Image: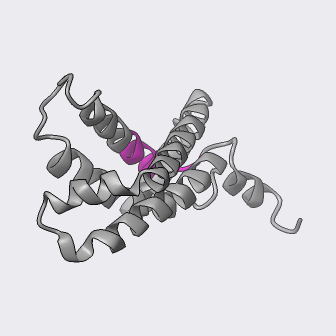
Amino acid sequence: MNAITKIESWADRHHPQWIDFLRILLGLFILYKGVLFISNTGALMDLMANKDLQFFNLGLAHYVAFAHLVGGCLIALGLVTRFAILFQLPILFVAVFFVNIEAGFLSISNNLEFEMSLLVLILLLVFLVYESGKFSLDNYMKEHPRW
């Protein structure tokens, strides 16, 4: 617990304001990907069918869509950011290391999906440390506890 407190203290002291706007963009991008998953669930099911996870297809599709929609909103607003990121991490780990890595780095066939997944995974890990920042609902609630 002491290590987590030290990391939070360091992140609070070294938190540039521009990184808050990056968090908002990341949340909006994840929300956009959630809308894409909902509008094209068939492609996700086809992708999972190729991975021998046929029993979990429907559950995985719902988890991915729900986690991206709700998590994207929470990350963009800066509300329970670490909690929302923890729900995103398994999705991005699977996307980077199992789904998109087969096509290869800078492959034209997948429209840079691997690179985007890797970038989003790295940003999620960064915001797991930095948390939400000054321009967030978490910070507002911390400064105005009785409002």
Please provide percent x and percent y for residue 27: 54, 45
Of the 4 image quadrants, the one containing the C terminus is bottom right
Q: Is residue 31 left or right of residue 53?
A: right
* Quadrant of the rendered image containing residue 102: top left
Q: How many marks?
A: 0
Of the 4 image quadrants, the one containing the N terminus is bottom left
Q: Is residue 8 visible?
A: yes
Span highlighted in magenta in the image: 123-132
Residue 130 part of the magenta-drawn span: yes
The residue at 76%/53% (across/down) is: 140
| Front one among 98 and 85 | 98
Please provide percent x and percent y for residue 22: 54, 33
User: Residue at the right extreme?
Assistant: 147
Q: Is residue 21 left or right of residue 144?
A: left
Q: Is residue 81 visible?
A: no
Residue 80 vs 105, above or below: the answer is below
The residue at 71%/53% (across/down) is: 137
Residue 29 part of the magenta-drawn span: no
Q: Main secondary structure of the magenta part?
A: helix
The residue at 57%/30% (across/down) is: 16
Q: Is residue 143 left or right of residue 92?
A: right
The residue at 49%/51% (across/down) is: 39
| Front one among 111 and 94 | 111
Residue 108 vs 6, above or below: the answer is above
Residue 146 vs 119, above or below: the answer is below
Please provide percent x and percent y for residue 77: 66, 50
| Front one among 72 and 107 | 107
* Quadrant of the rendered image containing residue 133: top right
